[in-house]
């Protein structure tokens, strides 16, 4: 008979039943968003302090959130001015990266996903690629679109393939020659886009034009 004592059942069961939180664990996207919020909050505090001096920022609890302790409380009007500048510069930066993405070969469908517009466009019955282009040029997914709207928005970016400055007229026509002007003759990217477009058109003419993405056969543009 072993002299090893029997395990303490109550203790073992108690250890197994560790308390758990009812809140779901934050996702990686949540953590990134919180990090950006903290970074921007610190930026506002720093800029208000730069403008008004140390007296421009007090410390105290946020209304309704006293249990979280004291937080920096920048002068409200100065904070509005700083936040307005941040918003304007962020919009400029977003536009620059949209153009970089197009120059690198990403489609307007890719950009719709990156901008979080895919579901919104689907609910509105707007092709996602057109919604992304309209948002990037007019700030609305249902903005004036195409050459027959009376206003023809466009964006400009440098093609990473041929290094030429391209005018992007939006994914309305399907033909890359109409949608993008300015590629260098023989541009590998533009040549490939034209070939893909011609292949889709040939398949459509043969009665097999449904490319499986639910649109009219033009594919991602």
Image (spheres, grey):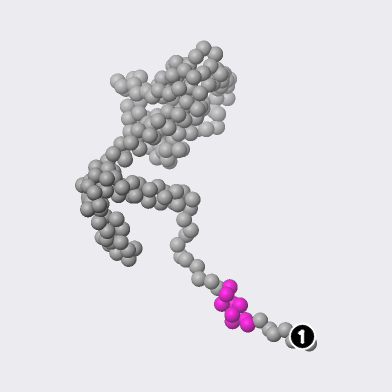
Q: Which residues are magenta?
A: 8-16
Q: Which residue position holds label 1?
A: 2
Residue 185 drawn at (x, y percent): 51, 12
Instruction: Name which residue lies at 42% across and 28% down.
Output: 99
In this view, the residue farthest toward the top is: 185
User: Can the viewer see residue 179?
Assistant: no
The stretch drawn in magenta includes residue 11 = yes
Instruction: Name which residue lies at 44% across and 19% down.
Output: 165
Instruction: Name which residue lies at 42% across and 50% down.
Output: 35
Residue 131 drawn at (x, y percent): 39, 32
Quarter assignment of residue 133: top left
The stretch drawn in magenta includes residue 35 = no
In this view, the residue farthest toward the right is: 1
User: Can the viewer see residue 121?
Assistant: yes
Q: In the figure, is residue 32 to the left or right of 151?
A: right
- Above or below — where is 23 with respect to 120? below
Residue in front for this viewpoint, 91 or 208: 91
């Amino acid at each position: 008979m072993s002299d090893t004592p029997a395990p303490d059942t109550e203790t073992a069961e108690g250890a197994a039943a560790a308390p758990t939180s009812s809140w779901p664990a934050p996702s990686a996207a949540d953590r990134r968003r919180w990090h950006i919020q903290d970074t921007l909050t610190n930026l506002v505090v720093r800029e208000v302090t730069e403008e008004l001096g140390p007296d421009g920022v007090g410390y105290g609890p946020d209304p309704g959130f006293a249990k979280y302790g004291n937080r920096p409380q920048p002068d409200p009007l100065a904070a509005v001015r700083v936040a307005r500048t941040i918003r304007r510069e962020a919009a400029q930066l977003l536009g620059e990266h949209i153009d970089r993405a197009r120059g690198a070969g990403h489609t307007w469908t890719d950009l719709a996903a990156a901008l979080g517009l895919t579901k919104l466009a689907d609910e509105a019955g707007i092709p996602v690629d057109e919604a992304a282009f309209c948002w990037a040029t007019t700030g609305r997914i249902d903005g004036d679109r195409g050459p027959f709207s009376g206003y023809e928005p466009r964006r400009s970016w440098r093609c990473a393939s041929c290094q030429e400055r391209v005018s992007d007229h939006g994914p309305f026509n399907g033909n890359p020659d109409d949608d993008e002007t300015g590629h260098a003759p023989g541009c590998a990217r533009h040549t490939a886009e034209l070939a893909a477009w011609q292949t889709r058109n040939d398949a459509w003419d043969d009665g097999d034009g449904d490319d499986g993405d639910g649109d009219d056969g033009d594919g991602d543009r």
